[in-house]
């Protein structure tokens, strides 16, 4: 039975809210960055993203009984406080993992083309092999790329195939960080810092699409000023939405925390919250994920002519350079920069995942077809 007169407060940047939650109650959209306790005085259900700290200060003396975050990470959620106050909770693990993996692959192909190397000639190190790291691992392995994996929690649980962080930093040509921001036995705050940044080999590529504070940004800036041979790709920043201007000038690709911002991933996250809330309330879900994705629209169409490379086709769906240029332009006005950071996220153009692309024209030769399939295209 549906709850009566359900009041829903949601981050204004969460898509498909009306489609999925419209029949359950009245939706009130607010800014996730500035959401406050007074916004929730009538709320039964709260839906947020990573920019909203959900804790006692936000929720105390409100009627909120369920919180959902349309994100993989939960470091912005006080889970203990929710549990102690019997407030239901769901995140959306894996919702945008494919999008982040595709962001990484698009960037690595860009750098490979610029610097004249093949990914299969490099060793890629993945730090944090969870939802995102696994997807990246799977795709790169299918491309034939040699990998080094670092994931202390999985290793501590008895899994095999991992290397210590210092070894990975010393051996990897490309380093990709996908660890959440964690405390406890395996803390990730400043996992890369002044001491171990020195281990990174010459001419490496360092990419962070996890959480900004996983790298000590001040130490990274000092180190990179003497190590310009290392290519930096940063989607996340330690003090978001404030960005270190000097560090931003050092990167080859800088973006405003949009690695997972595919329309597919966003809708998948909202649907996961819808499904979790229905289960929590004993409601039978009536809308499928497939229905929501089919209604997303703006499907990329790529005409194959027998001349394109994997890089050409990938960049026909997502080209990081455009996001980089918009991001760099947002840094010009220092005072307005944090606002511009959020505006870039709020007004981010539609980006579909590789699987949504429609390929037509000349049938690709087997090697290219295998590469396309490896990174996620339907061939």
Image (tube, rainbow, N blue to C red):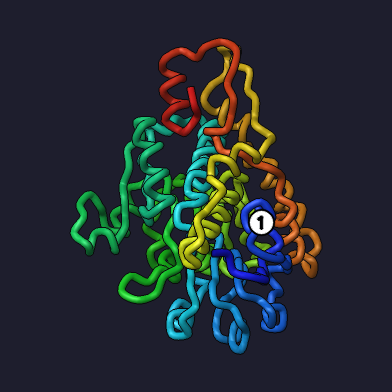
Residue at the image point whose x is 46% and y is 19% from the top: 368
In the image, residue 25 above or below residue 146? below
**Residue farthest along the front direction in this orientation:** 1
The x and y percentages for residue 171 are 32, 48
Count every numbered label the image shows and give the total: 1
Q: Is residue 226 visible?
A: no
Quick one: quadrant of the N terminus?
Answer: bottom right
Say which residue appears at 25% left-offset and 53% top-offset: 162
The quadrant in which residue 33 appears is bottom right
- Residue 41, position in %: x, y? 69, 82
Viewer-nearest residue: 237 or 154:
154
Q: Residue at x 41, y 22 (%)?
A: 370
In-image side of 63 versus 136 (left or right) = right
Left or right of residue 78, residue 244 in this image: right
* Residue 338 at x, y percent in the picture: 72, 66
At mark 1, the secondary structure is helix
The residue that label 1 is drawn on is: 17
Q: Which of 270 and 231 is in front in this view?
A: 270
Expressed as whole percent of the image width and height from the top left, the position of residue 4 reads 63, 70
Q: Which of 8 and 245 is in front in this view?
A: 8
Q: Label 1: how many residues lie within 10 Å, few (<14), some (14-19) or many (20+)?
A: many
The image shows residue 303, relative to residue 331, as above or below, that is above
Q: Which residue lies furthest to the bottom in this view?
A: 61
In the foreground, 355 or 102: 355
Instruction: Inspect this view and state whether residue 320 appears.
Output: yes
Write the residue at 40% across / 50% down. Answer: 133
């Amino acid at each position: 039975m549906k709850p009566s007169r359900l009041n829903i407060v949601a981050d204004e940047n969460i898509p498909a809210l009306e489609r999925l939650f419209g029949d359950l109650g009245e939706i009130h959209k607010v800014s996730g960055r500035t959401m406050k306790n007074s916004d929730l005085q009538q709320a039964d259900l709260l839906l947020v993203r990573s920019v909203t700290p959900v804790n006692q200060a936000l929720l105390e003396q409100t009627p909120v009984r369920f919180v959902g975050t349309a994100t993989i990470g939960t470091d912005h959620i006080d889970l203990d406080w929710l549990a102690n106050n019997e407030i239901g909770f769901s995140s959306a693990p894996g919702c945008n993992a494919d999008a982040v993996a595709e962001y990484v692959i698009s960037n690595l192909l860009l750098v490979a083309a610029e610097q004249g190397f093949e990914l299969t000639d490099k060793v890629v190190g993945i730090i944090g092999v969870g939802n995102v790291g696994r997807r990246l691992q799977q795709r790169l392995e299918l491309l034939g790329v040699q990998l080094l994996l670092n994931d202390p929690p999985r290793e501590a649980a008895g899994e095999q195939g991992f290397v210590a962080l210092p070894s990975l930093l010393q051996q990897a040509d490309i380093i990709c960080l996908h660890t959440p921001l964690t405390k406890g036995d395996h803390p990730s705050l400043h996992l890369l810092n002044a001491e171990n940044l020195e281990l990174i080999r010459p001419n490496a590529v360092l990419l962070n699409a996890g959480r900004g504070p996983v790298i000590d940004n001040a130490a990274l800036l000092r180190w990179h000023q003497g190590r310009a041979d290392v290519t930096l790709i940063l989607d996340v920043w330690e003090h978001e939405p404030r960005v270190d201007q000097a560090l931003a000038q050092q990167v080859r690709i800088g973006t405003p925390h949009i690695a997972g911002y595919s329309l597919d991933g966003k809708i998948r996250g909202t649907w996961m919250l819808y499904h979790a809330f229905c289960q929590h309330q004993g409601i039978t879900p009536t809308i499928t994920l497939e229905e929501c994705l089919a209604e997303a629209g703006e499907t990329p169409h790529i005409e194959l002519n027998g001349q394109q490379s994997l890089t050409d086709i990938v960049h026909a769906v997502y080209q990081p350079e455009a996001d980089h240029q918009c991001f760099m332009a947002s840094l010009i006005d220092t005072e307005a920069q944090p606002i511009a950071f959020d505006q870039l996220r709020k007004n981010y153009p539609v980006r579909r995942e590789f699987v949504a692309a429609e390929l037509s024209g000349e049938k690709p030769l087997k090697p290219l077809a295998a590469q396309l399939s490896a990174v996620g295209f339907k061939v």
